[in-house]
Image (spheres, helix red, strand yellow):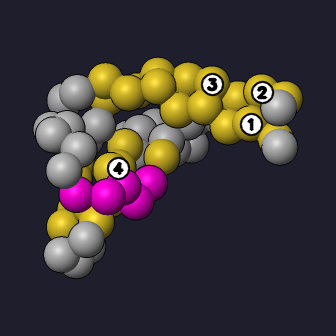
Amino acid sequence: MTKVLEFESAIEFIANINEHKDCLMSQDSNQDNPAALWFNIDIPKGHFLKNGDRVRITVEKL
């Protein structure tokens, strides 16, 4: 695998999608800043994450 990108960010909001999954979100208020990165990722329930927790996002090419 080849790493394409890795960054760390705080979870700003967790949305309840349905009975099986939530959506973790971080949308930087500086969206006009080209260096600002954000995420919106569905995740199975039972993750025990909360707003403010820091996570590492890694994108790899298989």
Percent x, y for residue 2? Answer: 84, 29
Does residue 1 lie above or below 39 as drawn? above
**Distance between mark 2 and mark 3 Cα atoms:** 8 Å
Residue in the picture at 56% in, 23% down = 7
Sequence-first tag of 1 and 3: 3
**Which residue is label 4 attached to?**
25
> Is the C-beta separation of discs 2 and 3 under 8 Å?
yes
User: Quadrant of residue 58 in the image?
Assistant: top right
Residue 15, how many percent across, how many down?
22, 62
Q: Nearer the viewer, residue 18 or 46?
A: 46
Which residue lies under the disc numbered 1? 60
Q: Which residue is mark 3?
A: 6
Identify which amino acid the numbered label 2 is placed on: Lys
Q: CA distance from mark 1 to mark 3?
A: 9 Å
Which residue shows up at 40% across the image and 60% down it? 42
Kind of residue indicated by mark 4: Met
Q: Does the magenta portion include 42? A: yes
Q: Which residue is rendered at x = 74% and y = 36% of the image?
A: 60
Tell me which secondary structure the magenta stretch mostly adopts: strand
Q: Earlier in the sequence, mark 4 or mark 1?
A: 4
Q: Which residue is mark 2?
A: 3
Q: Secondary structure at mark 4?
A: strand
